């Protein structure tokens, strides 16, 4: 299938030093492989170039195809690009179609919430139907999302790169404490704390309840019945939750506070957490996250806040946000994506990429 069929989409094939070793080892007579950039945005092209590059116009029949798709702000357009491209490759008789999706979109919508839908499951089904046979991603919001797919998913970890940044770029990091901004983030924070041999603190307190939660009709009274038949079982009344005022469990006084999470999108919670940590005596505050979505006016809020630095990886394009806020720093994780591509194509074990990764990481 000539690549010009995709219009502006770019075929990236010959290998940079990161992948050249794997390319020399592979059995070319058996099958080759191609790497495509799924959209023409600068960020996606740049990430693809860090993995492999050079234009060709050749058939994809019998090839292993890797589609690199970063997710910009126009999420649905990016998803549609990926679906159309996968389907075109499927109908052109590609042997395997592997999606390299560093940030998996809609990953926060992975649980049933009241009477809502599980959008993440829907997207997994759409990708399988379009022709994808494998996915490489980084730090899924919940590891259980892998069960939504009918094909293999390699959920790589960015924590080694972020931990390395802490060790090399944060002066006096030994005087730091790892902070979870909510009890649900405590496992991730504990993993960082144990690997860095640092203390742990957890934020706990009142969470704001949205108006939609209050007025969705769930607590409306039932219709009155005039029948005198069986009234049914009377279930015990569940007491409403009442959280205490927000507080810090752990000592941050005179320390560097490092807040860790997987996604930083709306930053109001992070800004509020930073203010409380400052009040408790933390003298520097860092945020470490894998995916920097940084939507809406997040750059302005970060710039005006007590946060000293926000460190995210290049799984999501955020060049515009960096121009608006110098506090935002980027860690490159293209190396682990390149190694995953090489190992999958050569049929090698992926265990090396998960060495020392525990179940709770």
Image (cartoon, rainbow, N blue to C red):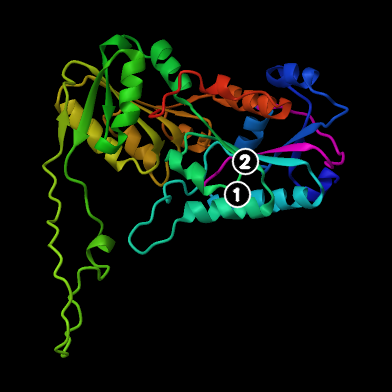
The residue identified by callout 1 is 78
Question: In the rendering, at what x and y percent does residue 327 appear?
Answer: 39, 27
Q: Name the quadrant containing residue 351.
A: top right
Q: Quadrant of the C terminus?
A: top left
Q: Nearer the viewer, residue 54 or 187?
A: 187
Q: Main secondary structure of the magenta part?
A: loop
Q: Nearer the viewer, residue 213 or 314?
A: 213
The residue identified by callout 2 is 69
The answer to whether 355 is drawn above or below residue 116 in the figure is: above
Badge 2 density bin: few <14, some 14–19, many ≥20, Cα 10 Å: many
Question: In the rendering, at what x and y percent does residue 296 appear?
Answer: 41, 47
Left or right: where does residue 119 sit relative to residue 84? left
Tag 1 near tag 2, CB within 8 Å: yes
The answer to whether 31 is drawn above or below residue 352 in the figure is: below
Marker disc for residue 116 = none
Q: Tell me what residue is drawn at x 46 percent, y 46 percent.
A: 107
Q: Tell me what residue is drawn at x 72 percent, y 29 percent.
A: 345
Q: Tell me what residue is drawn at x 44 percent, y 24 percent.
A: 159
Q: Name the quadrant containing residue 306.
A: top left
Q: Name the quadrant containing residue 192.
A: top left
Question: In the rendering, at what x and y percent does residue 44 appear?
Answer: 62, 37
Left or right: where does residue 252 sit relative to residue 292? left
Q: Tell me what residue is drawn at x 76 percent, y 49 percent.
A: 90
Instruction: Inspect the magenta stretch and tell me whether residue 310 lies in it.
Output: no
Instruction: Inspect the magenta stretch and tell me whether residue 72 lies in it.
Output: yes
Dot 1: element: helix
Marks 1 and 2, the one that precedes in the sequence: 2
**Residue 182 seen in the current view:** no
Question: In the rendering, at what x and y percent does residue 215 appear?
Answer: 24, 67
Q: Which residues are magenta?
A: 51-73
């Amino acid at each position: 299938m000539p690549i010009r069929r995709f219009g502006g989409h770019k075929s990236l094939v010959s290998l940079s030093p990161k992948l050249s070793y794997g390319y020399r080892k592979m059995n070319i007579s058996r099958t080759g492989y191609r790497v495509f950039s799924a959209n023409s945005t600068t960020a996606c092209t740049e990430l693809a170039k860090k993995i492999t590059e050079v234009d060709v116009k050749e058939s994809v029949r019998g090839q292993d195809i890797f589609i690199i798709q970063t997710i910009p702000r126009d999420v649905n357009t990016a998803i549609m690009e990926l679906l159309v491209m996968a389907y075109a490759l499927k109908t052109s008789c590609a042997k395997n179609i592997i999606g390299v999706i560093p940030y998996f979109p809609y990953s926060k919508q992975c649980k049933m919430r009241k009477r809502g839908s599980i959008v993440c499951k829907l997207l997994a089904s759409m990708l399988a139907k379009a022709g994808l046979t494998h996915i490489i991603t980084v730090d899924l919001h919940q590891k259980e999302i892998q069960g939504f797919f009918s094909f293999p998913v390699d959920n790589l970890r960015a924590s080694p790169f972020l931990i390395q940044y802490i060790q090399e770029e944060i002066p006096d990091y030994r005087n730091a404490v790892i902070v979870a901004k909510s009890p649900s983030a405590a496992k991730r924070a504990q993993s960082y704390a144990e690997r860095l041999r640092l203390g742990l603190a957890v934020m706990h307190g009142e969470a704001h309840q949205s108006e939609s939660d209050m007025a969705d009709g769930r607590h409306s009274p039932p219709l009155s019945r005039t029948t005198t038949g069986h009234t049914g079982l009377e279930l015990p009344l569940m007491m409403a939750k009442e959280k205490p005022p927000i507080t810090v469990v752990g000592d941050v006084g005179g320390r560097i506070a490092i807040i860790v999470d997987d996604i930083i999108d709306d930053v109001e919670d992070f800004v509020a957490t930073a203010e409380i940590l400052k009040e408790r005596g933390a003298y520097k505050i860092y945020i470490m996250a894998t995916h920097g979505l940084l939507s809406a006016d997040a750059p302005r809020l970060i710039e005006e806040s007590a946060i000293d630095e926000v460190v995210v990886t290049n799984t999501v394009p955020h060049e515009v946000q960096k121009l608006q806020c110098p506090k935002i720093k980027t860690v490159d994780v293209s190396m682990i994506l390149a190694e995953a591509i090489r190992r999958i194509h050569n049929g090698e074990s992926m265990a090396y990429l998960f060495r020392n990764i525990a179940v709770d990481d």
